[in-house]
């Protein structure tokens, strides 16, 4: 389980704690909110506003009050309700797209020693070349590799989501819609898996030598801005 625990100390200078810029902290918490909101809309549409269950409930309740409604009318109303939730899901998707672009731009303007690529490269060099503090370097490298995979999955999820959101304007590619939808859904499960692993890792780290990780992601860590 140690592999999923985010390291709190700098791989090059183990005696120092990591610091996080205000921009990175803002992205982290905004990303948390947006992804959570997006997943909640999926959960709502797969349970509470599921077309079949909702249409049956609508038809039953309306008939009890004396209204005459056909199965087709009930399904149409239920589908409209489901579409409204998907509309909210799409807006969360736009927000996620904006946050992903913000994270990519941040990589260029971030302080050098806080850039993701530099940290990944340093961890790799520490583990394979310099061979100093190898245990810390190996842990850092594993965590950074997991984050890199998360960014890749997030990118695929955003691209496929935009395709589905603008499918009416991409009629020429209608034949691949189902494949794109399946990839989008599969990426959602990977994101959920990452979230579970990340939360578990932070929880475990907070109980050990990594105590203070959450606080660091709120106040900036050792070098407060």
Image (cartoon, rainbow, N blue to C red):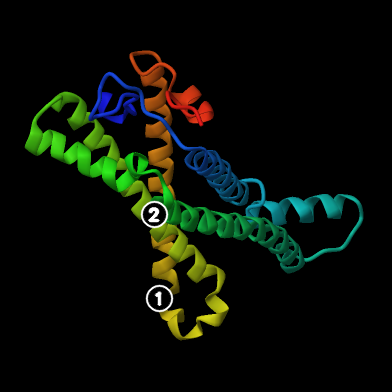
Question: What residue is disc 2 on?
Answer: 108
Residue for point 53% across, 46% down: 35
Question: What residue is disc 1 on?
Answer: 176
- SS at circle 2: helix
Depth check: 23 or 165 in front? Answer: 23
Position of 153 with respect to 38 (left or right) is left
Which mark is first along the chain, 1 or 2?
Answer: 2
Q: Quadrant of the N terminus?
A: top left
Residue for point 35% across, 23% down: 17
To which quarter of the image does residue 56 belong? Answer: bottom right
Asked whether residue 185 is in view, the answer is: no
Depth check: 85 or 214 in front? Answer: 214
To which quarter of the image does residue 121 belong? Answer: top left
Question: Which class describes the residues within 10 Å of circle 1: few (<14), some (14-19), or many (20+)?
Answer: few
Residue for point 34% across, 54% down: 152
For the residues bearing labels 2 and 1, Cβ distance under 8 angstroms:
no
Percent x, y of residue 105:
44, 56
Percent x, y of residue 38:
57, 49
Depth check: 55 or 85 in front? Answer: 85
Depth check: 88 or 224 in front? Answer: 224
Q: Is residue 220 above or below residue 97?
A: above
Percent x, y of residue 201:
36, 27
Mark 2 or mark 1: which is in front? 2
């Amino acid at each position: 389980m140690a592999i999923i625990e985010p390291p709190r100390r700098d791989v090059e200078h183990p005696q120092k704690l990591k610091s996080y810029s205000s921009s990175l902290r803002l992205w982290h918490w905004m990303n948390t909110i947006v992804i959570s909101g997006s997943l909640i809309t999926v959960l709502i549409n797969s349970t509470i506003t599921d077309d079949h269950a909702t249409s049956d409930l609508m038809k039953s309740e309306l008939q009890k009050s004396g209204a005459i409604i056909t199965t087709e009318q009930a399904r149409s109303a239920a589908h409209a309700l489901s579409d409204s939730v998907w509309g909210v899901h799409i807006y969360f998707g736009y927000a996620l797209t904006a946050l992903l672009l913000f994270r990519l731009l941040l990589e260029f303007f971030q302080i050098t020693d806080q850039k993701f690529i530099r940290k990944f490269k340093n961890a790799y060099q520490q583990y394979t070349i310099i061979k100093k503090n190898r245990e810390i370097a190996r842990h850092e490298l594993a965590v950074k590799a997991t984050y890199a995979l998360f960014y890749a999955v997030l990118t695929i999820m955003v691209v496929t989501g935009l395709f589905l959101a603008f499918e009416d304007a991409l009629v020429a590619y209608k034949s691949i819609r189902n494949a794109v939808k399946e990839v989008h859904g599969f990426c959602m499960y990977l994101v959920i898996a990452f979230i579970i692993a990340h939360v578990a890792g932070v929880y475990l780290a907070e109980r050990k030598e990594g105590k203070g990780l959450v606080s660091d992601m709120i106040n900036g860590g050792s070098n407060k801005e």
